[in-house]
Image (tube, rainbow, N blue to C red):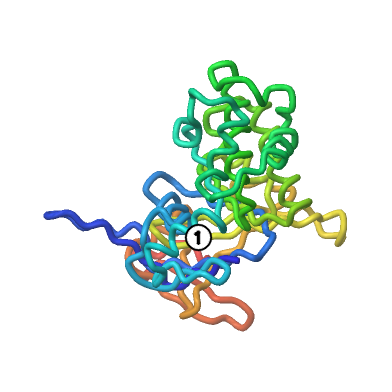
Amino acid sequence: MIECEGLVKIYKTDDLEVVALQGLNLTVKDGEMMAIIGNSGSGKSTLLNILGGLDRPSAGQVRVGPWDLLKVSDQDLVKYKRQTVGFIWQNNARNLLPYLSALENVEMPMMFNGKVDRAYAKQLLEWVGLKDRMHNKLTQLSGGEQQRVAIAISLSNRPQMLLADEPTGSVDSRTSDIIMDIFRKFNRELGLTIVIVTHDLSLAGKVDRVVAIRDGLTSTEFIKRNPNLDGAPPLSGVGVDDDVHEAYVVVDRVGRLQVPKEYLKQLEIGDKATMEFDGDKIVIRAPKSTEGESA
């Protein structure tokens, strides 16, 4: 569904140049539900904006289904945003029109697309648990209910992919669980590809795969496994539900990998390291002048 290779995004002003993505590689399968995590400034929101057609990449390759987002025309980009991708922001104000009812909000994207399907709009609100609230104005709904309206809006034009930027960042833990259950329902029953950007590691543990972004590059992946199915012992996952996720360092197509900073710090490795192949493993060491333990 998503294929990014060597993806670069540079923001320029008269006296400043910021590289937000510096050669990122990412593949997301059709029908997958995954999360992207990273610290502030890591590039995760920039990536989501590019995938959503809200921003243009500077270089590299990025495809979503049949769409080449590096080469797509402005006119086709409008079609892409209306037909292929749904977007949910953390800030409800970017999703919702407060003077309309929940049902009218869901119908609004349909109107822009030229066909209002009221029956489907009602069905969406029923799916997100708002059957009895669909005629209420937004001021009559709680923050969690408004976020569920936003989910229904994002699906109003039957997209193939849903992008969510911190979708549970402004709600309590119970509402967060409800929202994640809704995502899982749409993922399983509709085959919807879902990509969630979050800093909440507990939320990341509820998806099948987690990709960590650091300094504009993918650095680590955490893939869910069920140790009860394969007889394996509990798996070690750095920072994400140790019982169900296993951590992998990402190796790109030219053989580069990012060693986690905590490992480098423990080994007292700065800007240089020695590396050797020792039969069945690769050994990374600090230079002899500041030699630490082997990796």
Choose between 58 and 206: the one closer to the eye: 58
Compared to 279, does 165 lie above or below?
above
Choose between 93 and 263: the one closer to the eye: 93
Q: Residue at x 73, y 30 (%)?
A: 129
What x and y, as percent, mark residue 81? Answer: 49, 55
Q: Residue at x 53, y 33 (%)?
A: 169
Q: Is residue 266 visible?
A: no
Compared to 218, does 245 lie above or below?
above
What x and y, as percent, mark residue 97? Answer: 48, 29
State the residue lying farthest toward the top: 140
The type of residue carrying mark 1 is: Tyr
Residue 52 located left or right of residue 103 = left
Choose between 45 and 129: the one closer to the eye: 129
Disc 1 target residue:
80
What x and y, as percent, mark residue 116? Answer: 61, 43
Choose between 61 and 44: the one closer to the eye: 61
Mark 1 closeness class: few <14, some 14–19, many ≥20 residues within 10 Å: some
What x and y, as percent, mark residue 131? Answer: 74, 27
Question: Can you say which quadrant of the picture contains the N terminus?
Answer: bottom right
